[in-house]
Image (tube, rainbow, N blue to C red):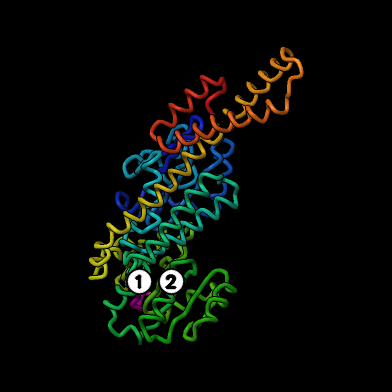
Amino acid sequence: MGIERSNKKLYNIGLSYKKADVETRGAFSISKENQVLLIEDAKLKGLDELVILSTCNRTEITGFANHPYELIELLCKYSKGTVDDFIKVSSIHKNKDAVDHLFRIGTGLESQILGDYEIVSQLKQAFVNAKQNKSTGAYMERLFNSVLQASKEVKNKTLLSSGTTSTSYAAIRYALNEFPDMDSKSITVLGLGDIGKNTCKNIVEYSSNKNITIVNRTHSKAIEFAKDYQNLEVKHYEELKEVLKTTDILFVATGANAYTITKEHLCDNKNLLILDLSMPENVDVSVKKMSNINLVNVDELSKITDKTLEKRKEEIPKTEAIISKYKREFGIWVDGRKFTPAINALKESLKEMQQNEINYQSKKIENFNREQAEAITDRFVQKITTQFIKHLKTNKCSINDTVSIMGDIFEFKNI
């Protein structure tokens, strides 16, 4: 699979739950505003095709660069992380490994909870954001489409995402373990991003609780979401402190750059379970010192497993087979892009040789039939071109060498 583009290589750099704890991941999280700034900065540096994925479990940049440090520098500049910290917990994938890594992410094999399908919408949104900011090209579009197609097939043809195990579901499971009588408890969900919405849906599905309040900075968004659910009460963000006075379980899924829950929001005499699903952490960890507060983050939630996960592990070979199929198709497309310009250059070179020879013969031969000569030699040009195309398609391992030899023989530069 030919990945390199001119002198640049495809890199995926970042960090995830595998090596970085929730606090470190929070430091390297990139806000939506900073993602836009990062992309604009990258363009000024000649890095015009990259995608940023920043979730509760990972922050990664995928793009073409001369050296991975170009992407690492941008990541650290637009997050609160440092290069020294990055080196301790990072992963760097290049060319084929970067492609493989994206396929594994998009199909749920790299999720903190195996098969967690929430990553798919996050990956889609990452690509949409990149496209809106004009940092994608044909290569990235094809790659991400291939990953999402593979993800869809994994979802439809395997049981990797079967059952109901995800970060938001794990939060509900934790709450149910803590409060077997959760139906009688007062629940508040703060934030209505993808995880916040999924949390609300899971609460409604797995409990009969009729005392659920949602709070969101954009009040109209909360109103719109609540229309589909009878049991949801909507409160203004400014009412949060008052709401928490009677809340037993608080789900935080805000994804802000600063704490949305601090000691100032909480009562000293009201027991409260807080499940922080945000990245970076949106609940000030100092609230743990309050004897009436039980604060749980995403890393602690990921430890909740059941038989569902064991069943999912059995689906890994099927998933990897699907990934291999889509990677193979993507590789054929990449190789095709690589030799198509060379074939066009070959054809132009042969056409030029054809016209030079026809011009030469027309001067030497009396009553030379130029039209007939062009018709005959056109067939030879087409046959020679077709033979090279067949060779390149059936001998993919030698594409670089063949294109280089073609350039030397027919005097055009390797494209």
Q: Measuring from the top left, give residue 78's x and y in whole percent.
A: 50, 45
Q: Is residue 289 visible?
A: no
The span shown in magenta is 268-274
- Crowding around mark 2 (Cα neighbors within 10 Å: few <14, some 14 to 19, many 20+) is some
Q: Is residue 323 visible?
A: yes
The residue indicated by pointer 2 is 198
Q: Secondary structure at mark 1?
A: helix
Q: Measuring from the top left, give residue 176's x and y in whole percent.
A: 30, 78
Q: Which quarter of the figure has residue 98?
A: top left
Residue 169 is labelled as 1
- Looking at the image, residue 304 sits to the left or right of residue 212; the answer is left
Q: Residue at x 39, y 53 (%)?
A: 58
Question: How many numbered dots are placed on residues in this image?
Answer: 2
Q: Which quarter of the figure has residue 341?
A: top right
Q: Secondary structure at mark 2?
A: helix
Q: Nearer the viewer, residue 197 or 326?
A: 326
Q: Which quarter of the figure has residue 348?
A: top right
